Amino acid sequence: MSNAAVLNVEGLKVSFLTETGRVTAVEEVGFSVARGETLVILGESGSGKSVSASVVMDILECPPGTVDSGRVTLDGTDLLGMEPKTRRGINGARIAMIFQDPLSSLNPVYSIGTQIAEVVNVHQGGDGRVRAIELLGRVGIPDPETRFGQYPHQFSGGQRQRIMIAMALAMKPDVLIADEPTTALDVTVQRQILDLLRELQDETGMAIVLITHDLAVAARMADRVVVMKDGRIVESGDLPTVASAPKHPYTRALLGAIPRLEQARQAALSGVEAKVLLRVEGLSKDYDLPGAPFRAGRTVAALRDISFSLDAGTTLGVVGESGSGKSTLARVLMGLDQPSGGTVQYDGIELFDMSPRDRRRFHREVQMVFQDPFGSLNPRMTIEDILCEPLAIQKDILPRRAWRDRAAELLELVGLQTGHLARRPGQFSGGQRQRIAVARALASQPRLIICDEAVSALDVQIQAQIIELLAGLRQSLGLSYIFITHDLPVVRSLADQIIVMNQGRIVEAGETGGLFASPAHPYTRELLAASGLPDWMAEVVRQL
Amino acid sequence: MNLFRRTLLTLFSLVGLFALVFFLSRVTGDPSYLFLPVDASAEARAAFSRAQGFDQPVSIQFFSYLKSILNGDFGTSLRQQRPAMDIALEAFPVTLRLIAVSLSIAFAGALLFGCLAAIRPRGIADRLISLVSLAGASAPDFWVAIMLVLVFSVKLDLLPTSGLGGPAYWVLPVFVLVLRPFGLLGQVVRGAMIQTLSAPFIKTARAKGVAEQRVVFVHALRNAMLPVVTVAGDLTASLLNGAVIVETVFGWPGIGGVMINAILQRDFAVIQATILVTAVAILALNIVIDLAYGWLDPRLRTA
Amino acid sequence: MRTVFGPGILAGILLATSAIVASAQSITVVLPEEPPSLEPCESKHSSVGRVIIRNVTQSLTVIEPTSGALEPLLATSWEQLDELTWRFKLREGVTFSDGADFDAAAVATAIERLQREDIVCNTKQQTLGGVELTATPVDALTLDITTSEPVPILPTMMSVVQVSAPSMPIEGASRQPVGTGPYTLTSWKAGESISLALRGDYWGDKPEVSDATFVWRSESAVRAAMVEKGEADIALVIAGVDADDPQMDFAYPNGETTRMRISTKVPPLDDVRVRRAMNLALDLEAMKPIIGSEAQLASQLVGPAVNGFDADLKPFGYDPEEAAALVKAAQADGMPVDQTITIIGREGIYPGSTEILEAMQALWSEIGLTTEIRTFDTGNWLRYQNRPFPEPDMPNVHTDQHDNLLGDATFTLFNKYHSDGVNSTLHDAEVDALIEKGEPATGAARTEAFQAAFARIHDDLVADVFMYHMVGYTRVSPRVIWKPSVSTNSELDLSQVRMAD
Amino acid sequence: MSQTDPAPLARPDRAAPFRLGRMLLRDPAPLLATCVLLVIVFSAIFGAELVGETATKPNFALRNAAPQFEHGFAYLLGADNLGRSVMGRLVLGARTTIAIAAGAVVLSLSIGGALGLVAGSRPGLLSDVIMRLTDIIMAFPSLLIALIVLYLLGPGIGNLVLVLAVTRIPVYLRTVRAEVMEIRRRPFVAAARSMGAGQGWIMRKHLVPLVLPTLFTIAAVDFAAVIIAESGLSFLGLGVQPPDFTWGSMVASGRGYISSAWWLAALPGVMILATTLSLAVLANWVRLATDPAQSWRFFRASKGSST
């Protein structure tokens, strides 16, 4: 294998400057990849996989990062000791990279065409316009001539990642590094992007280094896999071998998380008397888009005629892709947005016609966990302040002197330590922050929690932990959930009822089991097909 | 907000400002003291007020003034005995030229050095640039101006002391006017660039093989421009009627000096005319800045 | 940046240096401010007067600056026909710069123009007071001027009346004066400069300077720098601190006299002991360098060249012990000397004025008087200068500076010290009587009455905090030969300027 | 997510003020800035006790004396145009200077900040009205504002502070508005609303703390502008009047002496500069040090960087 290796990494050690001194982030990391081969680096966030890729791309922030030792070679040429200018000439031309979040990775103020053409321009000179349009067409952007001059925010998430790919492939690189390329995308789109990468690899014969935390993605793509944990490689080999006989405890835990997800629901199903907690009828919501100067705006329907009801103690899964209206639904249900039509009744009281007293009760009893654990916690507040905020807003829930104890109790409930109360969100990982968000939602002793993509951005292992946490709380506290997600395996494990949304409408609704067993709507079927592990892998996992 | 509505609202501001200035400037004292000799009698002053119409209620004065404006007459300067608008329009281009040149230099310099400072916050370049720019921003302008004349014109005999003329005449006044905007803008650029340079798309650009200068000045800078443009707008507005020190020290007959003299002399027609001219410029500038936001950031074009 | 700046600066410097080389006969004068107009009627405004008086327009009579004597200019002689009428003989062969003949009709028109109602005419208001003039041509070169009330010094008054050409419009203030002087206005670039050029057909001796350009800079240091650098030849009025080069800088008594006017009717200032103490407490000799070491201590509001000046009056001197004792004595008699006295100042009334006030405040506090300083802009200061006073019950001393341009104490005494004077805080029957006695009188009687009034004001009443006969400073380039005089504050006679070579 | 976050839980748990304090001790520039500010505050409080008569009593013999050793410690920095010790006056002037500058900056920051907060968080009629008022203030000459206040409200330090504050409002207002419009779209604001938080709560807890660092940076630079503007208003009778004085009025009264005694204006100018610079250095430092994304810049480096 190493003979044909185009990219070779050996003995890499990287450390970071932190408050307490140097901390080693990556140690003794080595891997190689050959032309036409796909190497998957699998690991949770913070395992050092992105750091390694940054070293290869020469985009590590130095300081605070330092490459202490190691070798990175491309076709035998040392990349680390190179003159910065020569080194920069290799990026984009011989090694290219795509990133997790295509929206923030594309420059918002330049048109996408300019950004693609720039690669050609930088490495080859001349106008890259023709090549850019050709590439846009190749990665499946319809009408590339017109869309050449448009800006990143005018594209969907999947299209943006396609644009990133076009940019990366502009100079037909030998190696493509894809850092979590599909994590931020909807399941159906994920699949398309991965297929596109495959196709393009077949066409150009490039090597791909795919970095992911998602076993399903790894299973679809990998020729070989490297598993990283705490900055070290704990396992490597071809995927079926690694999956069927994991040697390292971490690998075993990673594989074990999948069945845990499926089991969570069974544990929670027990007879609670059916009392309707939330009833939604004919709900619709229109948005007015502002017009250009001297022109009128137009109206877009985000929700159309949504009706369902939720019994106390049960969980409703709301499934759909981005743009399906599911987040708007969450905002309307929380009273953050006014609906254009229809009614929402909470505990028999009309939500948008509540007395102030009822409204206060509603805000106490219904809480929300947001999709983005980085954005939904104020970075300048301490964890204690964050957890006490619901109590501080409605001061009659608990006397002030009891707040601190309550906050400590909540932290322990979600598996964190009371010593963390004085910290700020920036000091926690994504999974920990989402636990904090859950703890905050629990502070006011709610009856219903609305989770909007609450686990989508998290690693599979942490997903499983949060889901288990929620399931456990449901049982101990008698909570109800509305669980909004694009990720089918997640709802399958938690929801009693599921509604599937597409373009603002409910296209299918029903019992979880029945819906998974025999999906009626084509869209549901498409969703199901796109998600989850390939069959062979699912089999391997189940047998563990 | 669309342009039509924005312009309409701006017109409201303009009318409001105009009326406010008219009414409030008349509480700042009786011009007869200034326009008559020190020993003029009370009767002479009363006669003067009568002749100038100052004895009428202010609201009546205002409406008759509005009426004459509709006829294109913005009043006559008491002191110079000629149309007030002529005086304002003579002086305005001088100020405009001066601040156009100064702010262009300050803006370009702030962009360049602010970026250099932001590349490595707390590095040597950053500290040096921050020191120089803050020193410039907090130095009293008249002190700097006179010091420059004494050093560069008199001691070193390099530049003319003052007055209008060729490029050499521009050096000192422009330098003084550049100091504060440069200091302030430099700090803003630096702050915004530090944030922008840690954005993910900067990594993308580097991964594309874009040279570092281009990463900083093309990819990052345009993203960091919004707060810079806001502050630059504020600075321009403040200089449009506030470049007085430089104008008077260097003998540039600009509108700031005209306005200050008119205020001190209670030459109401000139106050109104100069404020009208500068206000139109400032309000138009605010609209231009709103438009610039859209040009700089396509995401703001529809929203 | 470099490409823009490097050669740019060099080129600029070359341009600038070459621009300075000018014709040998032309000079540049730098003034403190731009004239608002060049209206002959406004010639008492120093910024106007310095450009036009004697250069563009002339008067029938002139006051010789050094002696204070009245001399003929456009009039060759004059006589008083009766109490109200004066006859002036005009000079022959004089023409206005627009070609019109200078004759009695022209002067009559000019006097009429002076008295119009549409604009504020400083000359009329300030000098003529309420007196109406009627000019009647007798023949081409003889003119009778009749006054509405007796004016014994009409010929002196006529020295401020600038004779404008009949062609000048009656309405509005003129920016294009036409007169009989040796120079005509060639251009006025608003905000930048005013240029005068020598007339070919001037009636008198041809001056040496052929062209004069007036520019203005408000900063004294810049004006001084311009002469030092050769950008200007004469800087009229620079601050004393900037006059540091004995080769170029000339001090001259500028005719101004300063005082602090005391509100003599408000306790504790109605006690003469307190007023005397305030004078004694000031070390005026030591303070002098603040406003100019060449200044003279004053004991009256007019200078030696003015008719009515009393040379026997002596300054009080500096005696803080005596001052403190006087204050104590007043206090013992129940005077509220602990009342705060307001010092009213005006920013920039003369260079160093704020420091002077600060020094006074400190020195008065030494003798046990409490003061507060209130500095105003000119507009606000004037409210406190003129009756009716805004806060009549406020014990105050008020910064004042006075220039008796016409050389006769009547122009000072009435307004400043008479019970009915607009600027007066004094109500003393004896002073009133002396002024009223002097005004209609002539000759020695007039002089004596005025001298007695000044003596009463100074010695008995101590109506003011007497300060200085002020000095002005000019900077004159070695290129030209010219010396300032007492009239320099109001005019710059270009015909007196000689080129050095 | 973030590669610079390799060991999130490894960080010690220390109270923030202590942490900042320790960071400060290790960092010479902001440490120096803090010391300068402490000295100035000390002068402002105890200045009157520290300096004797040399700072207030005229001494005509030493008029405009240059900085020198000959006349003793008090005249080390020379004497002013009435022969008073410049050093003594710098110390004595600190109190009024700081009172006026801090008063004006705090007032404009509060008013501008509050209005900007409202304008940014509630688009609509109110916001429009506020923004148009800002336009008016921006176009209104500050000298006229000063004269109007003088005539309507009379002289006095309070009114002076008011005038200075009014003219500075637009800067704060516009900056806050722009930032608020961005921050209020962030999820944690929606999170707070979903808990039933009202506008006031959101402003107090979520918007203000995030906007403050930017405001402090502007305020630091504004300090100098306010002091210089104050000296410019003295001549209207609105500024401080002797025997009170500020560094600004010291600069202004030294204006006439630039060619003969440059130190009269330069030394108080240096004090203004030192204060502004210290404030700005400290503001920038706090801003970087409390920003989680930038705080690594303060960690002690053991090696040079490499790529």
Image (cartoon, helix red, strand yellow):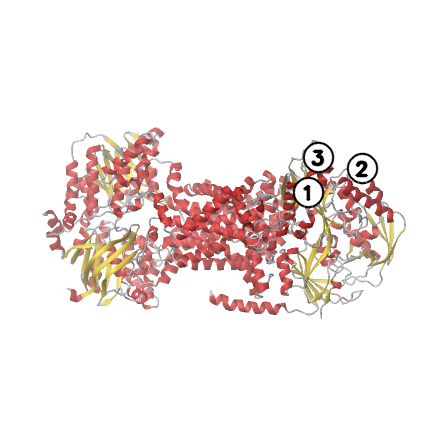
Please tell me which of labels 1 and 3 falls first in the chain. 1
Residue A339 visible somewhere in the drawing: no
Q: Chain of mark 3?
A: C
Residues C294 and A232: in front is: C294
Residue A432 visible somewhere in the drawing: yes
With B273 as the anchor, is C469 left or right in this view?
Answer: right
- Give the numbered dot on residue C252: none
Nearer the camera: disc 2 or disc 3: 3
- Please state the horizontal and vertical placement of residue C4, each as a whole percent of the image: 49, 66
Q: Secondary structure at mark 3?
A: helix
Q: Chain of mark 1?
A: C
Q: Amino acid at mark 3?
A: Ala
Q: Quadrant of residue B127?
A: bottom left
Please tell me which of labels 2 and 3 falls first in the chain. 3
Q: Which residue is mark 1?
A: C320
Residues A487 and D244: in front is: D244
- Residues at marks 2 and 3, common chain? yes
Q: Which residue is mark 3?
A: C330
With C172 as the anchor, is D29 left or right in this view?
Answer: left
- Please state the horizontal and vertical placement of residue C173, each as a whole percent of the image: 71, 53
Q: Are there few (<14), some (14-19), or many (20+) residues within 10 Å of tag 2?
A: few
Report how far apart the C-alphas of labels 2 and 3 lie in the structure: 24 Å
Q: Amino acid at mark 2?
A: Ala
Which residue lies at the image location 20% right of the left edge and 33% below the top edge? A476
Q: Amino acid at mark 1?
A: Pro
